[in-house]
Amino acid sequence: MALNLSEQQAAFQFKGGALTVTTLELFTADVLMIADELSQQTRRAPAFFSQTPVVLAFDKLDQDESVALDLIVATCKQAGLVPIAVRCAQDAIKQSARALGLGWFPPQSERRLREISEKVEQQVIAARKPPRIVRNTVRSGQQLYAKDTDLVVLGSVNEGAEVIADGNVHVWGALRGRSIAGAQGDQSTRIFCQQFKAELVSIGGIFQTFESYDWPEAVERPIEIYLDDERLIIGS
Amino acid sequence: MAKVVVITSGKGGVGKTTSCASIGTALAMQGFRTVLIDFDVGLRNLDLVMGCERRVVYDLINVLSGEAKLSQALIKDKRLDGLYMLPASQTRDKDALTLEGVEEIINELKEDFDYILCDSPAGIERGALLAMYFAEEAVIVTNPEVSSVRDSDRIIGLLDSKTRMAEQGQAVPSRLLITRYNPERVEQSEMMSVKDIEEILAIPLVGVVPESEAVLKASNQGIPVVHDQESDAGQAYSDMTARFLGEERDMRFAEIEKKGFFSRMFGGRR
Ligand SMILES: Nc1ncnc2c1ncn2[C@@H]1O[C@H](COP(=O)(O)OP(=O)(O)OP(=O)(O)O)[C@@H](O)[C@H]1O
Ligand SMILES: [Mg+2]
């Protein structure tokens, strides 16, 4: 609890670097539909949504679809998300974003996506480090991140805890909290656990929340979670 | 040299103060010089449960702010030799609670006592963090319900990171005390079982105290329930303290009583 108030010299420092940000990829501009779905999701994993920055992506919408950005942003905020930027080709949305004080990213073309995934693959191969091994139970309120590598938890991951890896996540006990594999976007990563009672899992940015009734029947057996064509498969 | 033990839970109203009073009393009965510190500044009720509220003159905050000597603030238990308590303040503000101040008090008490029990306030804020900071052992008080277990989990995580021992790279040995346990309601799946709780919290179990009317009666009279050896809760606290001291004892009160079992089995026949 010691306070280290070292003397500050510079007022700030710019730092480049890749942050993982959740993208909310909208398939509709219908605010009511968005609001409905968000409120369902928030009820399932309130902690995940609390103050989570998101980029609103409009790539999947028709070019001429009219978008009430201010309403969408307000809806997100109500759900606890914090929109920080938009990603779109449409100039109208870009302008609304400016007015609302949001940043703008250019749309991701197919080519660029391919480049990124190739780059990620290269990075993954080049940067694979020894796994991060955690020997105890990861408890509510704790968050662990294995950068550029796998995370191996020899205990359980309890409700309210979060384990994140750029590679795979292995939980030798029960997974009761949240687990995120491929945090930098690697969709070939997997999550393994001895018992699946998770609140949320995510692989390469594709996530799903769970209620107790979503858990596999026999929860007491080893489970493997992976992506098949961008769909989360929970198998054993 | 004294051992500092924190009684903590995260969630409020689960039985920390009740437990602190009874464990402290049981330790003193075994001949250990024991002092209880109430860290619940603003609420103050360990003195009520110990039945010494009338004799509170100075409190923890008075000592911390230098208005009273530690020896003036310590209240001697009227039933047992070697049992003392340091009350919290009901009125004063919590800012006077500082890490350095608490350390000084604990160091002074260490000279004179075998056990220093810290009764933590609920929550995970300053008071709770201060109560656990110097702990060398912890008793995690948990009720058989989801929210209590989750808060306990959180607290165990904090014990592993926000204590002096953690800063020195050691884990604070923590043990689980399940209170207000009702095996009948567990049977009906209205409450979590000992096994479920143990599995989630993954720390050794030191005792199970049943839900008991004796507890309420005892705290109203200001006599720690462990004095009432006729009662189930009193016996459970004796067992728990014995286990805390390293003795092995059967885990009573975790199962439905045999009598209940047989009457259910054969009850319909007569
Ligand atoms: N085993 C038990 N059976 C029945 N009642 C109990 C039991 N243990 C505690 N209680 C009751 O629960 C209430 C809360 O107990 P206590 O004050 O010990 O909890 P606490 O964790 O110290 O609360 P706080 O967080 O407010 O400090 C009291 O009314 C007490 O009498
Ligand atoms: Mg209390």
Image (cartoon, rainbow, N blue to C red):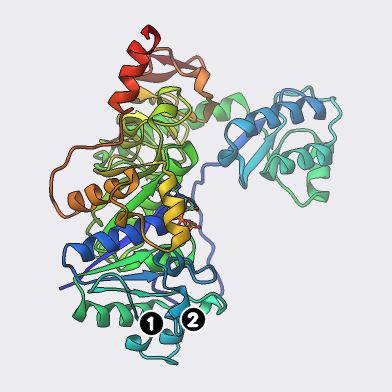
On residue B96, the disc is 2
The residue shown at (49%, 46%) is A18
Question: On the rendered image, what quadrant is the N terminus of chain A found in?
Answer: bottom left
Q: Which residue is mark 1?
A: B101
The residue shown at (63%, 32%) is A43
| Mark 1 crowdedness (10 Å alpha carbons): few <14, some 14-19, many ≥20 | some
Instruction: Identify the amino acid type marked 2.
Output: Ala
State which quadrant residue A179 falls in: top left
* Residue B128 in the image, given as x and y percentages of width and height: 43, 63
Q: Earlier in the sequence, mark 1 or mark 2?
A: 2
Badge 1 marks a residue whose secondary structure is: helix
* Residue B175 in the image, given as x and y percentages of width and height: 27, 49
Q: How far is the residue under mark 1 from the one under mark 2?
A: 8 Å
- In the image, residue B67 sits, relative to residue A155, either above or below, namely below
- In the image, residue A163 sits, relative to residue B44, either above or below, namely above
State which quadrant residue A175 falls in: top left
**Do the residues bearing badges 1 and 2 touch, measured as CB atoms within 8 Å?**
yes
Q: Is residue B175 left or right of residue A187?
A: left
Of all chains, the one bearing label 1 is B
Instruction: Identify the amino acid type marked 1.
Output: Gly
Residue farthest front in this picture: B270
Of residues A181 and A128, the one nearer the viewer is A181
